[in-house]
Structure formats: C-alpha cells, structure tokens
Image (cartoon, helix red, strand yellow):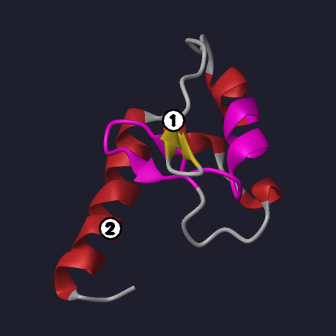
Amino acid sequence: MKADGRLVPIRKLRSPDEAMDVVKDYVGHAIVRVGITQFPAGVGVEDASQLQPDMFDACANLRTGTGIFAKVARGQR
C-alpha cells in the first residue's frame, strides 16, 4: 500500500474480514490494491461502507479487475 508516495507495509492478513478492516482504515488516505488483479480498492467508492468483501474472492476480483482494465484499454474512466 502507498501513502504520501511511500510504500507502507502491513502485517499478513489471515482472513477476508481482517483484510476488509485494513482496507476500510486506509481507503481514501492511501492507495490500497487488493487481490489477484491488484486493482485499487477505492475506485468508484465515495465511502468505505460501500466496499464489498467479495473483492477478496479470487473470481470476483478477476471480474472486477478485468472490467477496470477493459475501461482503461478503451480510454474510459
């Protein structure tokens, strides 16, 4: 994760619930990349309560990441 241009290491997380707690703490303050595709957790999210725990599920993460990358490839935001 990056905050203020610096890499911030975090402890190894053992469950999706632990990971969700960390993401909610940092989203909006740092760039938090999650899952296989390493997409930014806060994309399109205005409030941390809108985050979905399925971003830690491999299949859901691939679907979301693929959608984001497709938009980037088409030049959309």
Picture layout, residue 72 above or below residue 67 = below
Residue at label 2? 67
Pick the front one: 25 or 6: 6
Q: How many marks?
A: 2
Magenta part of the protein: which range? 21-41
Residue 39 location in percent, x, y? Answer: 40, 52
- Please indicate whether residue 54 sits to the left or right of residue 38 in the image: right
- Of all residues, the one furthest to the left in this rendering is 73
Residue at label 1? 56
Secondary structure beneath disc 1? Answer: helix
- Please indicate whether residue 63 sits to the left or right of residue 28 in the image: left
Q: Is residue 25 magenta?
A: yes
Q: Residue at x 35, y 68 (%)?
A: 68
Q: Quadrant of the C terminus?
A: bottom left
The answer to which quarter of the image holds residue 37 is top left
- Of all residues, the one furthest to the front in this rendering is 5
